[in-house]
Image (tube, helix red, strand yellow):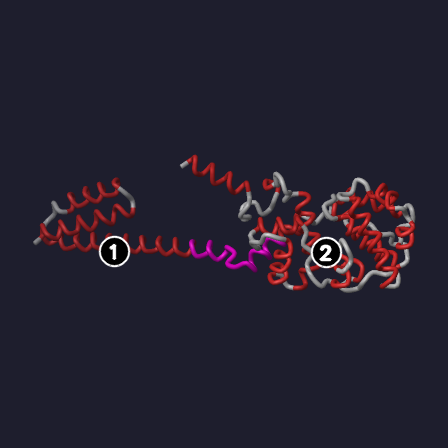
Amino acid sequence: TLRSIVRSIMVGTRSAARKREGPSSMQEIKDQLKTKYQRKTKDQTVVVKEEVNIEVEVEVKVEEKVVVKKELEKEVKVDQPIDIEDIWKRDLEAIAEMRKNEDAAVDTMGCHMLHDKGAEPQVQRFQILLALMLSSQTKDEVTSAAMMRLRAVDCSINSILSMRRSELEELLKPVGFYRRKAEYIQEAAAVLKEKHAGDIPDTVEGLCALKGVGPKMAHLVMQTAFGRTLGIAVDTHVHRIVNRLGWAKTNAPEQTQKRLEELLPREEWARVNKLLVGFGQQICQPVRPKCSYCLLNTTCPSSSVKEIKKKVKKEEE
């Protein structure tokens, strides 16, 4: 009957109108129906077709909106890193951008900068080793100053062996653990003169056999003195940053070195130490890291900026 048709149209139209435009549109449709159904019976069929067309048109528009929403969500997900390789690549390039000026202490006073470039090659290699032995648990500025004092009195194997222990200690102060390092340096110099013809070993194993030399120093010596990158040197800066960024979960630098060498391709090994050390000196510092200046502050798992944003959002909710 006409009454049943009208009721069914009003129910369908009301649902469609709510999706499309809200309560005000529903009132318009009611007014239209009220006016149209005051006509003669032969016009009623036309009215029914018009209203059905309205309902179909609304459904099509709603479907289009759903499709657009799904496509947008898909695009956002594609832009996010999907595995650890994407993450370290993104992080390393951002760090390289922050370090492009090369103005950290490691760049100007690092152990690769402290030897006398005008000396004989084997003397230069000894000075590189010496600088690295001094650098352990000592700031680059302090190590650099000590090396300049040593170079002023002819920093060679023979000159080190000819010094009294107390004299060498005075030249090293205030290097961290300077007394112990003075002992190790003189013992190493004696071994180098006796067993290596006054030069330093050209293997990681040979370097680590010297008292006071560990894997980090050995790899940096090989890279700086011989131009051979055989592993990644991991100090406290590198260990801290790798764990903060979520590249690894390790408890010691040796574990971090192993993880990095598994994670990074060999072509990245040479640059990663200096990049991360300088980043640790300037931005990702041990205490109160400068997260607000860091390009990774929205993606780093340890970012204080990220935590502040979460707190603000929670308070707003």
Q: Nearer the viewer, residue 112 or 259?
A: 259
Which mark is first along the chain, 2 or 1?
1
Residue under numbered circle 2: 214
Q: Residues within 10 Å of mark 1 (few under 14, many from 20)?
A: few
Majority secondary structure of the magenta segment?
Answer: helix
For residue 91, above or below residue 283: below
Residue 300 on the magenta span: no
Q: Toward the viewer: 40 or 182?
A: 182
Q: Which residue is mark 1?
A: 56
* Residue range of the region highlighted in magenta in the rendering: 73-92
Instruction: Say which residue appears at 43% left-offset and 35% top-offset.
Output: 315
Given the image, on which type of amino acid does mark 2 rest?
A: Gly
Could you say whether the residue bearing mark 2 is in a helix, strand or loop? Answer: loop
Residue 272 drawn at (x, y percent): 67, 55
Apparent side of residue 42 relative to residue 158 in the rendered image (left or right): left
Q: Which picture quadrant has residue 291?
A: top right
Residue at x 69% of width, y 49% of height:
277
